[in-house]
Amino acid sequence: MAAACRGILLPLGFLGSLFLIMLSFDPWDTSQEKRERMQHLQEVRKQLIKDICEGDKEAFSEGKHSLEDLSNKDLNNLIVDDTHGLIYCYIPKVACTNWKRVMFVLNWSEPYHDPMSISADLVHVPKKLTLLNSFPRTEMKAKLKHYTKFLFVRDPFVRLISAFRDKFLRSNNYYYQNYARDILRLYGNQPDPPETVEEAFASGMHLSFYNFIQYLLDPLTEKEQPLEPHWRQMHRLCHPCLIEYDFVGHQETLQEDAEQLLTILKLQDDIKFPPSYENMTILRFVSDWFRTVPLEDRRKLYKLYEGDFRLFGYRRPHELLDG
């Protein structure tokens, strides 16, 4: 299958092939044809990661060359289900709440609960789910070797917009106190922002998307502490050059990918992945969001997230970057 993938990719390039595969989905396909196409798409996604990592491993490893180099903190996002032999690397703003719901109900005995019956707040409570780094090192390595490992990714710029809208355009006092106030002071020409998010919103003071981008691009941001997980690069959360994932899902094909994964796990008759109501076609709005961001800063932002674009097969947004 991998050789067949490479044969197709030679004339088209990975992204060209990926695009053609997506276009080839036909609602009238038989189940068998659909399974074959989606299996082929998985091979393309995994082969792309392998090729990019082999070609430029240093760019994505942050000085780490093997699993032994990953600290417990590096493995904060890997959730384990020992009953079904599963490891899920969750990425904030990529359907992670619903996948955490699925992982949560898998810890119960059959018949499984409807994942949507689980509170979103509950699955984000520490220790409600079992993390890989809670095990001794020898067990971690064994699980990583033998368990089925999966992750879901998303267009990096769309994910950034989603994170900004969720954490800064809604009344969230934690993100206001820990991030927005400093960003307003440093980049928003607000030397003394209100103490609380309620006061800020009542006075009409909101963080702008460009202020957020300025914060991300400031070299001092990363020097003080790693980027917050909601806007940290996806490959830095899940380490795909050091951990070989068995399944790579995309938010843009979330329902189909979720159905395929549950079928692979032989859980398709036991659990239904929650329907997604978030607007996942926001790509057409990306240009509007970036309208206030100068061209040079757009290019710098792309460089900051270029690893995610390349590893996970997302096209370079030339309409934003070529002027």
Image (cartoon, helix red, strand yellow):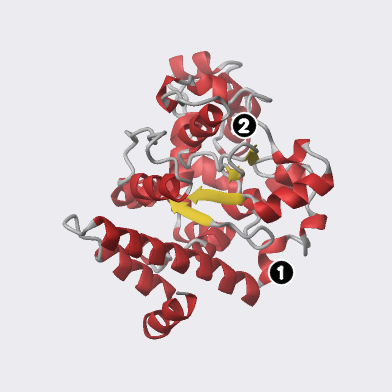
**Identity, as a three-letter code, of the amino acid under mark 2:** Tyr
Quadrant of image for the C terminus: bottom left
Residue in the picture at 41% in, 45% down: 258
Q: In the image, is 2 to the left or to the right of 284?
A: right
Residue in the picture at 31% in, 39% down: 279
Residue 233 at least partly seen: no
Residue in the picture at 40% in, 71% down: 15
In the displayed orientation, state which residue is furthest to the left. Answer: 28
Q: x, y percentage for residue 124? A: 58, 26
Name the one closer to the observer, 155 or 321.
Answer: 155
Q: In the image, is 7 to the left or to the right of 34?
A: right
| Element on which disc 2 rests | helix
Q: x, y percentage for residue 100? A: 53, 33
Residue in the picture at 48% in, 45% down: 160
**Identity, as a three-letter code, of the amino acid under mark 1:** Glu
Residue 187 at least partly seen: yes
| Residue 7 sits in quarter | bottom left
Vertical side of 237 occupied by 13: above or below: below
Q: Residues within 10 Å of mark 2 (few under 14, many from 20)?
A: some
| Residue 20 sits in quarter | bottom left
Q: x, y percentage for residue 290? A: 40, 50
Mark 1 or 2: in front is 1
Vertical side of 52 occupied by 170: above or below: above
Residue, disc 1: 58
Q: x, y percentage for residue 314? A: 43, 62
Say which mark, if any, is on residue 213: none
Q: Residues within 10 Å of mark 1 (few under 14, many from 20)?
A: few
Quadrant of image for the N terminus: bottom left
Of the numbered discs 1 and 2, the one sitting upstream in the chain is 1
| Element on which disc 1 rests | helix
Vertical side of 211 occupied by 301: above or below: below
Residue, disc 2: 179
